[in-house]
Image (spheres, grey):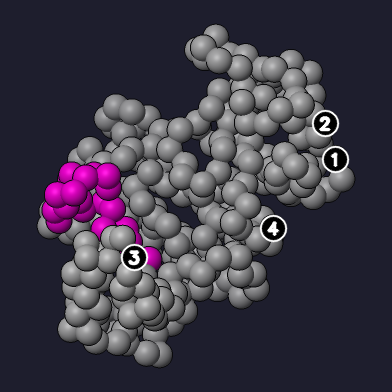
Amino acid sequence: DLESGSRHLYTPAMSASVRIPDEVSRAWRELEGECRVEPLAGGLLHSTLRVRTSTGTWVLQRVSDVFSSAIEDNIRSVTAHLRARGLVAPVLLPSRRGAVGVDAGPHGRWRLMEDLGGVCFERLASLEQARSAGRLVGRFHGALRDFDGELAPMGIPYRDTPAYLKALRHALATRKDHRLAARVRPLGEAVLAAFESLGPPAEGLPQRVIHGDLKLANVLFEGPQPPARDRAFALIDLDTLMRGPLWMELGDVWRSWCNPSGEETAGAGFDLAAFEASWRGFVEGHAEPLETAELE
């Protein structure tokens, strides 16, 4: 149950009901009539449903309360820019009142999108898959080089490393009596020492529009088996669109894509072959030369 006070919807593959609040089902014409609903796994913050109706298949999300309502405007403007340049991108569907997000009061904020199909992977299945995914990310960045629209803050401190380090130093200095202090302190000090050895990031780099959360699971591929498995066609989960340097984007790409152990394991590794394949793909997709400072 996502919320109480709503109608029951079933799909044969489910053993339990899924509920969509009445305020939400009435908000979009696409949700009229009989619906079959199934939950989609993989998201960490939103509740996501695939909804099948007589008019099509849609993705319905209850958006986490941590995000500002302005992120839907960010998504709408950036995806319109991407589609105008030939990329596949999710379309936010306007409600009956023309809004791309619907506030259902105690039931939360919701949005409806076209279902793009495809499949996601938690880990790379092949080097060709890495190259194809990198090529798509390169096309994404190339297409957004001339995007000059405003991007509203997403409502949470995100990728603000100086703020995180300041909070860590404060916690280590002021929470010495915490029950976990003895276990946390060595890790916290190691993190601070590592950043000290790296030095500050380069200044004056181009501030690109970045996806902001390009773990492999946010890349859609055409199908589960080759050759469809090795053809990336869309990036999803665009809540974290922001401006930042290219290293911030690609560092997170390689953290996720190049770890053959997966993200939920203690023993991380780094696959240099996956790194090379995805980087070659990025260069192919981006097409235009990067600035020297970005390469460095």
Mark 1–mark 4 contact, CB under 8 Å? no
Query: How much space separates mark 4 and mark 2, taking CA atoms?
Result: 20 Å
Mark 1–mark 2 contact, CB under 8 Å? yes
Circle 3 SS class: loop
Mark 4–mark 2 contact, CB under 8 Å? no
Assess disc 1: are there few (<14), some (14-19) or many (≥20) residues with their C-alpha within 10 Å of its C-alpha. few
Query: How much space separates mark 1 and mark 4, taking CA atoms?
Result: 18 Å
In this rendered view, identify the residue nearer to me: 116 or 286.
116
In front: label 1 or label 4: 4
Task: Examine the rendering and report whether any part of residue 23 can be seen.
Answer: yes
Dot placed on the residue nearer the N-terminal end, 4 or 2: 2
Circle 2 SS class: loop
Marker count (numbered): 4
Which amino acid, mark 2?
Arg
Q: Quadrant of residue 57?
A: top right
Q: Which residue is mark 4?
A: 69
Q: Residue furthest top?
A: 12
Task: Examine the rendering and report whether any part of residue 114 can be seen.
Answer: no
> In the picture provided, is 143 more to the left or to the right than 55?
left
In front: label 2 or label 3: 3
In front: label 1 or label 2: 2
Which amino acid, mark 3?
His
Q: Which residue is mark 2?
A: 26
Q: Which residue is mark 3?
A: 178
Circle 4 SS class: loop
Percent position of residue 257, x then y: 26, 51
- Residue at left offset 37%, top offset 78%: 174
In this rendered view, identify the residue nearer to me: 88 or 60.
60
Percent position of residue 261, x then y: 18, 44
